[in-house]
Every structure is written in structure tokens, then in C-alpha cells.
Amino acid sequence: MPQTTLFSLYESSKLSLNNRIVMAPMTRQFSPNGVPTSDVAGYYQRRALGGTGLIITEGTTVNDKVATMDANIPQFHGEEALAGWKKVVDAVHGAGGKIMPQLWHVGMARVADKAPFPELPSAGPSGLFKPGKQGAEPMTVAHIEAVIEAFAQAAADAQAMGMDGIEIHGAHGYLIDQFFWEGTNQRTDSWGGSMANRGRFAVEIIKAIRSATSENFPIVLRYSQWKQQDYTARLAHTPSELEAFLLPLSEAGVDVFHCSQRRYWEPEFEGSELNLAGWTKKITGKPTITVGSVGLNDDFFGAFQGQGSETRAVDDLLERLDAGEFDLVAVGRALLQDPNWANKIKEDRMDELQQYSGKALATLS
């Protein structure tokens, strides 16, 4: 394969990477009682050895009792869990890689009786899992403020242990996205109503993280139009609406936007070939990560039903990256299946790439 931007150095004032390939976060539930083990360290180390430029970990929960949906999802709080993550960082750095944790609160996606602290109700801006489906009372302002602080503390802990930045999970219908989405945020106070008010929770988290970390510590925000509750949901129907959504987040301190789509090759708005990452870069001027079935010929929803997916050529992806539509490319299932995916692409070993099997699924975080 000719050398393209995909294998060029990525340099910004806050982040330096050997190439433009990012491992997308994928939840695995392999951390007993929320503590990442040596197996977790080995899992990420293999992807670093396989040529991945930046690893974003599976979703790892902040310090709120109802932040998680399963006891085996890793936590990013508590002495034992943080010590486990330090071993992960050291393993990845020892392999020449870079790594960030994805900081997560699942919100109303938590099923209380299947999660730790089953006696506690799940948390959401209006207690709605999806429009019309009530599961709890609305979050109190005190709880909102406590969760903001939990994100800030997790980011501070990440920097202290040597992580290369953090990603905030603001996508896929989890807590932050439940504040974004008008369908699940029916509040009438300053945390709901207008798009600016619905974005305030994320803005305050970003500001709190920036205050708790150094100015040169990268903040990545992952967001999506679609929700697990509604694949057709959209936060913004037009470029102007997307601008109104994104600019306050950018101004609050986001350094990189991670833009989740079902298929990266699909245009976001009529009249332009730009995908979501392309529009986000055009509007904010910030670097963007594109993601959505990279290297595969189908989106990930079929995988939830155990369907496989054949490999897909990445020529169009490389052309768009070379043209500057986006800056980094996140790879999910292909890297889950094959930790050496990046090196095989670089060395033009396409015949060695494995067909993805739904049986190997880890859920997108």
C-alpha cells in the first residue's frame, strides 16, 4: 500500500501519534468487580504492538453508584481499579502506544435489578430511557453536580497515572446523550429545554475536567446523532443546528471530536458528501475522528444478532483522510477480531485480514 496520511504522524499541540489509526472503545465486561486485570492489560498491549496509533479504552465508569450496568464493566475510581488501569497504561506505553480511558455514565440504560446497588433507581435528566418510557424520577441538581465532579476527578486521576488524555462518552443514548436528546430531556429548569440548556451538562463536565487537569491534557468528546433507543434519532437536522450544538462544546474545551456513525461513508446532510466528522471539523475547526464500520461492509447492528461481516476496502476512506475531511480513523470490530489489523493494512497484507464474526462481538461503548 502506498504511504498515505493514514500512516503519517499526527501532531497537535497536545497529542502526538505514530499514525492516524484509533482503537474505538468497545465494552467487554471482563473486569471482575470493576477492576481491570492483567488480561485487560494484555488485550490493549496487543493492539499497541499491532500498530494502533491511539487506543481508547472500553467505557469505564465514573464514581457514581448508578453509573454502571454490570459489575464486570471496569471502573475508573477506587484504589484497586486505578491501580489496575496504571498497569494497563504501563503495558501500552511499553509497547510504544498511546492510550486514553473513555469516561462513562450509562444513565437510564442501566437496568437497576441487574446492576450493582439494585435498590437504587437509575439516573437520567428526566428519568426517561426513551421518549415515553419512564424508569425513574428526574435527577436532582445535587446529583447532576456530583456526577460533573465525578467526571472531573476521573480525568485528574487519568492524568496522574500517565494516560495520554481522556474521552468523554457523550453518545449512543447514555447519560450525557440523554441530556442532549430532546426526547429524553424534558426538564424545564436550566438543564433542559433549549439546545443550549440541554448541552449545559456536557459543557459543565468539559469545563470541570479542564479545571482539574493541565491545559495540555487532551479532551476528546464522543457524540452521535443515533441512539441505541432509536437508530433514526437526530440531535441536528441541518448544518446550522449542528453548529448550535457543537460550538458551545468546542468553546468549553473539547480538543478532538469523535463522531460516531453507523457507516462512515454516508453523507450527514443532503447536498454535501461530508460525513459527520467532516461537518464537525468544518464547523468547529477542531480535529475529528471518524468511525463507523471501518474495514467492514456492513454496520454493527447486525452483529448484535450474531451476523458476520466481510472485509471492505478502505480506498475511499484513505482518499477522504488525505483530502482532510477528518484527521483520525477509529476502528472497532476489525481491531477486536485482529489486533494486528493496522500493521496488515500498512504492509498491504489484505489477504490476511480475517472476516469478522458476530461471535467475537464486544458492544460499542
Image (spheres, helix red, strand yellow):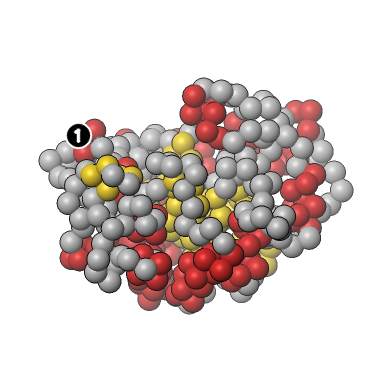
The quarter of the displayed image where residue 119 is located: top left
> Is 258 rendered above or below residue 334?
below
Residue found at the far right of this picture: 2
Q: Position of residue 288 (x, y in %)?
A: 61, 61
Which of the two residues, 50 or 282, is positioned nearer the viewer here? 282
Image side of residue 99 versus residue 139, left or right: right
> Is 289 rendered above or below residue 247?
above
Q: Badge 1, how many Cα within 10 Å: few under 14, some, many 20+? A: few
Residue found at the far left of this picture: 119
Quadrant (top left, top right, bottom left, bottom right) of the N terminus: top right
Q: Mark 1: which amino acid? A: Asp
Q: Residue at x 63, y 66 (%)?
A: 281
Q: Residue at x 37, y 57 (%)?
A: 182
Specify whether residue 345 is in view.
yes
Q: Position of residue 280 (x, y in %)?
A: 60, 63
Image side of residue 316 versus residue 30, left or right: right
How many callouts does the rendering have? 1
Which of the two residues, 90 or 178, is positioned nearer the viewer here? 178
Which of the two residues, 8 or 144, is positioned nearer the viewer here? 144
Say what secondary structure mark 1 lies in: helix
The quarter of the displayed image where residue 269 is located: bottom right
Q: Which residue is mark 1?
A: 113
Q: Residue at x 66, y 42 (%)?
A: 294
Q: Position of residue 117 (x, y in %)?
A: 17, 41
Q: Position of residue 287 (x, y in %)?
A: 62, 65
Image side of residue 257 versus residue 103, left or right: right
Specify whether residue 38 is in view.
no
Image side of residue 349 versus residue 238, left or right: right
Q: Residue at x 21, y 57 (%)?
A: 139
Quadrant (top left, top right, bottom left, bottom right) of the C terminus: top left
Which of the two residues, 165 or 36, is positioned nearer the viewer here? 165
